[in-house]
Amino acid sequence: MNIGDVADRAGLPPKTIRYYEDIGLVTPHRGANGYRAFTEQDVHKLAFLARARALGFTIEDCRALLALYEDESRASSEVKHIAEDHLAQIDEKLAQLQQMRDTLAHLVHACHGDDRPDCPILSDLACSKG
Amino acid sequence: MNIGDVADRAGLPPKTIRYYEDIGLVTPHRGANGYRAFTEQDVHKLAFLARARALGFTIEDCRALLALYEDESRASSEVKHIAEDHLAQIDEKLAQLQQMRDTLAHLVHACHGDDRPDCPILSDLACSKG
DNA sequence: CCTTGACCTTCCAGTGACTGGAACCCCTAT
DNA sequence: ATAGGGGTTCCAGTCACTGGAAGGTCAAGG
């Protein structure tokens, strides 16, 4: 199968798939014309990657998950460990983002947003006592 | 004032301050020895930047905000507009992250995490019907 | 057979916002 | 004189792609 079809089926741009080959996440064979020839298994792997990336796992997480995925004898605890780590990171990011959101929403709310130059947003940024 | 002191007072690493000079956010003078010589105003500006960046504004947002900040006659509506845009972006990101969190938490919860190879996390990643 | 257009290939460069490191200069204290 | 802790520049790397140029390949239509 050519890269374009794989891209459609895995839900990843061709550029990204080539990049994944560059960094060794997939290793498609080559046809006589030099085109990459993907197997069903490759498609499966790439779809796995697409989903894991969509869940915010880093490429290195994905590499580890793929290795575990392909290891028949892995323990589920290893996978759980990676996922839990990632979950904790997401929680931290969520908290930070929520904090940012609250502060910003407060500022936007306080700003009258008219033609006058006074602006609570800028005042706050200028001296972070808000 | 030298870059180290400014870094302490503005809450930014020296490297970052040099980078901000590179991209034209600040333009400190130079002493006879070639060292950057920062004024109080520079410190103020950098602290402004530190705060705005901490609120997740992009560098280009910051550039715009700084310009508005230094423009005595700006309308607060312009600032509000930038802030509202940014707030909307944050909200979107929050929603995505929350969605990711929910899915992942569900998977982690479903995984027994023992020595056996069965793992709902990998199963889900492999075929996204979960 | 030729052309057209869609596909494929490689390689290089850019993104955003820094960060690390090398190699070197300057200032102060001992 | 020397040791250290500043400062300077510049180059390269990060992360995960993405855009674009230059060129090869393939199937369909005239």
Image (tube, coloured by chain):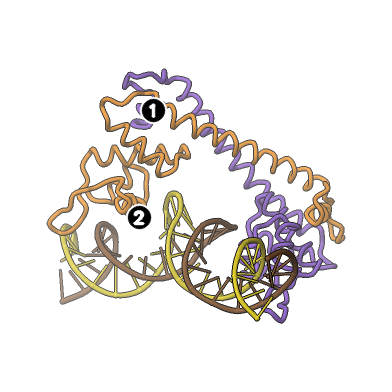
Chain colours: A purple, B orange, C yellow, D brown
Q: Residue B38 at x, y = what percent?
A: 22, 46
Question: Mark 1 or mark 2, which is nearer the start of the sequence?
Answer: 2
Q: Residue D26 at x, y = what percent?
A: 71, 73
Q: Which label was assigned to residue B15?
A: 2
Q: Is B59 rendered above or below residue A41? A: above
Tell which residue pokes out farthest to the left in this image: B32
Q: Secondary structure at mark 2?
A: helix
**Residue type indicated by callout 1:** Glu
Q: Which label was assigned to residue B78?
A: 1
Mark 2 and mark 1: Cα distance apart in space: 31 Å
**Residue type indicated by callout 2:** Lys
Q: Secondary structure at mark 1?
A: helix
Q: Residue A43 at x, y = what percent?
A: 77, 63
Quarter of the figure with residue B9: top left
Mark 2 on the same chain as mark 1: yes
- Report the front residue among A93 and A26: A26
Q: Which chain is indicated by disc 2?
A: B
In contact (CB < 8 Å): disc 2 and disc 1: no
Q: Which chain is indicated by disc 1?
A: B
Residue A129 in sight in this render: no
Q: Is A91 rendered above or below residue A124? A: below
